[in-house]
Image (cartoon, rainbow, N blue to C red):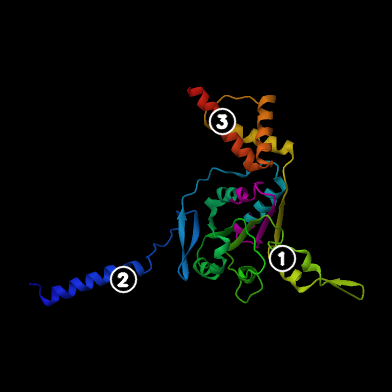
């Protein structure tokens, strides 16, 4: 027969087993001396940083044909890493043209100097104040990276982003910058109806408040970098670069010729665009196919 104490302990153990799944998980603090990147996850009313295992295999020299954009963002990042004034940056333009790759390459360039990268999804931007609170007293320099940032009409999260970037009493700490990529220059859809209420006063044209509100968000980024669709010549130069990289890694002998050039052009036509992502994918496809033929 169970004693009263044993019965109490058994019931307490059952109760704890039912309550434990409802309790928040205890997260181990990230060792930023060893961890180079993390991703913000929302959890209940708060969130946490999940360490990421990243490979530093992408360098600035791998980005072909976007020298001006690379130079400007690299200079801004050097200022930031050295503790000098630097700007939040918006990288906007055509898809697959190297916007996200440029940010990754800068981590490779400056990881040894204390630069760290944190990914945050657009839907989690409301958590920015909590994230900033966790990072502001750390010695490392953090680039907060939001890929494919844009908002639809009626969404209010962009107002949180505006206040963190600039314009609120509590500014972002000196050890944090936001780098965002987008296909939209002003991050918000621009409709013809937005311009319906423009007024001419004494010969001056005053845009409506809706337009001013939308442009005000992108104005918070001190550095704008534009990325444009590739010409065919630009596309083929990127293809040759990635063919060289992948073939060298696989000890594959290859030669650029007219047949290979036409194959790359057909690959791009089949996907409806010419960009760096398409060039990278073709190079992997062609090198993998050549290696497979060697094995068989």
Quarter of the image where one finds residue 254:
top right
Residue 144 falls left or right of residue 49: right
Looking at the picture, tell me which residue is in the foreground, 102 or 291. 291
Which circle's residue, 2 or 1, is located before the other in the chain? 2
Count of labels shown? 3
Residue beneath disc 1? 219
* Residue 112 percent across, percent down from the top left: 52, 51
Is disc 3 placed on a helix, strand or loop? helix
Identify the residue at the far right of this view: 203
Looking at the picture, tell me which residue is in the foreground, 116 or 155. 155
The quarter in which the N terminus is drawn is bottom left
* Residue 84 percent across, percent down from the top left: 63, 61
Residue drawn 72% across the image and 38% down it: 234
* Residue 243 percent across, percent down from the top left: 60, 32
Residue beneath disc 2? 19
Residue beneath disc 3? 287
Inter-mark Cα distance, 2 to 3 = 54 Å
Q: Residues within 10 Å of mark 3 (few under 14, many from 20)?
A: many
Looking at the picture, tell me which residue is in the foreground, 4 or 30. 4
Residue 135 higher or lower than 279, as above or below: below
Confirm whether residue 257 shows in the render.
no
Which circle's residue, 2 or 3, is located before the other in the chain? 2
Inter-mark Cα distance, 3 to 1 = 44 Å
Q: Which residues are magenta?
A: 78-103
* Residue 115 percent across, percent down from the top left: 55, 55
Quarter of the image where one finds residue 222:
bottom right
Q: Mark 2 against mark 3, which lies toward the viewer? A: 2
């Amino acid at each position: 027969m169970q004693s009263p104490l044993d019965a109490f302990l058994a019931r307490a153990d059952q109760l704890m087993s039912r309550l434990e799944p409802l309790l928040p998980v205890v997260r181990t603090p990230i060792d930023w001396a060893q961890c180079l990147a993390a991703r913000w996850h929302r959890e209940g009313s708060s969130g946490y940083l999940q360490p990421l295992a990243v490979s530093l295999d992408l360098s600035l020299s791998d980005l072909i044909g976007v020298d001006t954009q690379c130079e400007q963002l690299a200079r801004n990042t050097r200022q930031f890493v050295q503790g000098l004034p630097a700007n939040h940056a918006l990288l906007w333009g055509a898809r697959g043209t190297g916007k996200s790759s440029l940010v990754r390459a800068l981590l490779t360039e400056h990881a040894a100097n204390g630069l760290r990268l944190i990914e945050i999804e657009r839907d989690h931007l409301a958590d920015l104040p909590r994230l900033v609170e966790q990072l502001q007293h750390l010695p490392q320099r953090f680039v907060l990276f939001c890929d494919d940032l844009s908002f639809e009409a009626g969404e209010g999260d962009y107002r949180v982003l505006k206040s963190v970037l600039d314009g609120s009493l509590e500014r972002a700490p000196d050890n944090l910058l936001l780098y965002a990529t987008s296909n939209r220059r002003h991050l918000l859809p621009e409709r013809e109806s937005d311009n319906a209420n423009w007024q001419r006063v004494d010969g001056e044209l005053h845009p409506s408040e809706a337009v001013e509100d939308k442009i005000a968000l992108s104005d918070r980024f001190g550095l704008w970098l534009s990325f444009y669709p590739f010409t065919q010549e630009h596309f083929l130069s990127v293809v040759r670069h990635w063919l060289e990289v992948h073939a060298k890694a696989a000890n594959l002998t290859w030669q650029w010729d007219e047949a290979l050039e036409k194959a790359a052009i057909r690959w791009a036509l089949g996907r409806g665009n010419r960009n760096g992502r398409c060039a990278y994918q073709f190079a992997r496809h062609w090198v993998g196919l050549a290696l497979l033929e060697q094995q068989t």
